[in-house]
Image (tube, grey):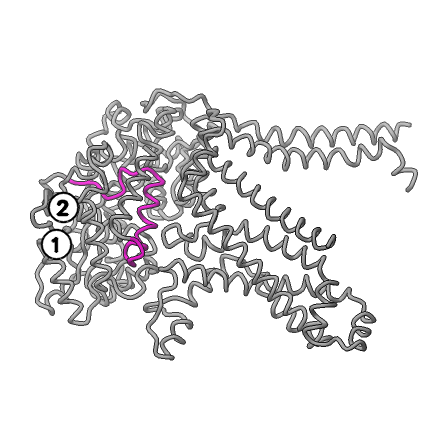
Amino acid sequence: MNRVFGDRKTILILLLPPLAIYVLLKVVPVLWSLGLAFFQGNTLRGFEFVGFDNFTTFVTDGAALQSMWVTISFAVIMTVCQVTFGYLLALLYVFVLRKGSAFVRTAVFFPMVLPTVAVALLFRSFVAVGDNQGPVNDIINFFGGDSVEFMASTSGTMATAIVMTLWSSMGFYAVLLYTGLLDIPDEIIESARIDGASGLRLVRNIIVPLSAPILLSSIIFSLNSTLKVFDSLLALNKGGPGTSTSPLTLYMYRTAFEYAEYGYGSTIALVLTLLCLVFTLTVFRSSNKRVED
Amino acid sequence: MKNRSTRRGLALTGLALAVILPLASCAGDTAPAPGGTGDAGASGADPETFTVLTANEAAALEAQLTALAENQCKAENEALPLVHEKTAQADVVQKVTLLASQDALPAHFIAGTAMVRPDGDLGVAGLVGDYEEILTASGTWDNILPAASSTVKNVYGHMVSLPYQYNLEGIWYNKAIFSEVGLDEPQTFDELLDASAALQTAGYQPFAVAGSQGWPMTRLMGMYIVRNVGPKALVDIRDGNAKMTDEGYVAGATALQDLAQAGYFGEGFNSLEADAANAAFLTGKAAMKYDGTWFLSNINDEAQNQIGAENVGFMPFPAVTGGGGSIGQWPANAGTAHAVNPKTAGPKVTAWLDCIVENYGQQALQSAGILSGFKVNGEVTGLPDTTAFVQETIAGIDDETVLWFEALFDAKSNSLASTNATLLTTGQMSPEQYMADLQASLESNR
């Protein structure tokens, strides 16, 4: 085996085909899209080089800036909620439910396997108003309040989207963080307990620092997935009312495929990529600083 | 030694395939040179099949064309077999753009409104045939109703779509409820407001509105503008002779907002789907519904219509007192654009088109009660009363028809008009702001 992997030709023969496929199917389209950001037009009309015009348009495009704001605020709120609730659930699994946590873990994780569009339609019906009123408004009516048309307001749609995303994803973050907590040696926790640490103090001074790497990964996972949110907000209320809950991904999709502006659509995609990069690097840098401190 | 060289050969072949296959799949992605000659007549070479690309949502069109292929157009179908291709309505622009750029457009295809106009992507590239030219040459042009061809030319700029539907838009109303509340058909917008108030007091929801679709709201606004400013109101916007922010136009947005804020659209109308709005009218919960004559298929369906077809009336959007438009100017449309590919419009495709224009009118009306923009050649029996009434209404139009609100908008402004309607009707956006945003979008996409 060592002889085989020690041979450069063998390595090349084994590596080149997948590498070629990866480059052709992944790297080339990404670079192609990057290049398109400097052009205007589509495959039918043809493309015209416009330099940085698309970027100038982006910074003066009210709809694009609004979408960027929606993307950033949704990502920040969701990351805080997903990681916090995921971490609390993980603590519950490890320190309260212990070995009996399997059922709860499965139950909380279950929504993760449901298609996002189905979940969005489910939540849309939960908050429905009118003839087919959903349970949320039934409860509001029960306590004497008037029915609320959640999908007619930005705050109502955003609140529904946040609860929906949290419901369907916190199980995943709980399992991810749970595996991190399992890696903390029992001896350390026991010795901390003997030294008098318990409850919140134990969590703050022992558990959180020791699970920092997996927390960091969770934050990066969460930020990158929520910055690219698309299907849930589209299925929930088509980015409405108006375009007030339309994220950058939806604006990019509409620009490229509904308005056939591939160049400007690629520019929006590039901005989104840069956004993901900036957020990820910021999280990395802040964690490195903390380690140095 | 031989074994080793075989392995090397296999590895190299694999590598070559890995490189060649993706490149081969990209080979068709070459864009044709822009700068075509606009619309074109029938000068193409016939394809292998008469492939028709239609929207998933247009099931009736597929069924009618299939029926023609089996009966009246049997000979044409044997010479060039009919093949259906489907796409979601929402994906039409993307799909057609891609097919056109790969030189793979079917013989007859659905397209986006803006794409087929002379300055649209397909129009500029010369990828839409002119039906007037094709059908005049083959002697079947007379089968297109003049009103339908006029509407197609108004909307698309040239005769690049077959009028598989010819629709009027207006207000469907429940005659039994109107009679119970003591109402006549409102002739002015003020009378419509009075009627709505009376209906609300009597416990009926005045309007059924599928707010989730956007357009059922914007059409009310558009019709108010057309009645208030005049029949050329939307053409003036396109030509830059007027702005959406002008007083007469903002009044339309205000009128829509007032209707919604008065509660005339019922609870939760903004998230109401089309089926639910149809049901609200057809079960007698709502007294009126602004819709097109395509709503006839629901009205004629006994399973859906619980108020009885005899209780359904149809009236035009009322006049605005002191306005430049009149109640006799019906908004009309000829359905979604269905273009012909000039590159494949050979003799066999032309024979198919001839057969469609000669027979579709009678076939669709007889079997599905669909009113099209084709001449009805032959007898139609057992037509439902409501359909016959609408047919008479269409035949009796002696005034000019007008366009619907978004007809001349670009795709982006069209979408903005619909999506922002929710913000307008819920009071989250003022009429002035709504119109200012729309005007800005129209100008930036001009």
* Residue B163 seen in render: yes
Give the number of the disc on residue B161: none
Nearest the eye: A178 or B342: A178
Query: Furthest-bottom residue in view?
Result: A143
Q: Report the label total.
A: 2
The type of residue carrying mark 2 is: Arg
Residue A208 locus on image (x, y percent): 70, 65
Query: What residue sits right under mark 1 in the picture?
Result: B189
Host chain of mark 1: B
Q: Marks 2 and 1: in contact by CB < 8 Å?
A: yes
Give SS at disc 1: helix
Residue A286 locus on image (x, y percent): 66, 52
Give SS at disc 2: helix
What is the C-alpha distance between the residues marked 1 and 2?
Answer: 9 Å
Q: Is residue A3 left or right of residue B380?
A: right
**Residue that appears at 90% across and 42% down:** A1
**Residue that appears at 46% across and 64% down:** A123
Residue B422 is covered by the magenta coloring: yes
Query: Furthest-front residue in view?
Result: A293
Quadrant location of the C terminus of chain A?
A: bottom right
* Residue B382 seen in render: no
Query: What residue sits right under mark 2 in the picture?
Result: B227
Q: What stretch is highlighted in magenta?
A: B401-429
Residue B377 is covered by the magenta coloring: no
Q: Is residue B173 left or right of residue B122?
A: left
**Residue that appears at 53% across and 28% down:** B28
Nearest the eye: B420 or A231: B420
Residue B169 locus on image (x, y percent): 20, 48
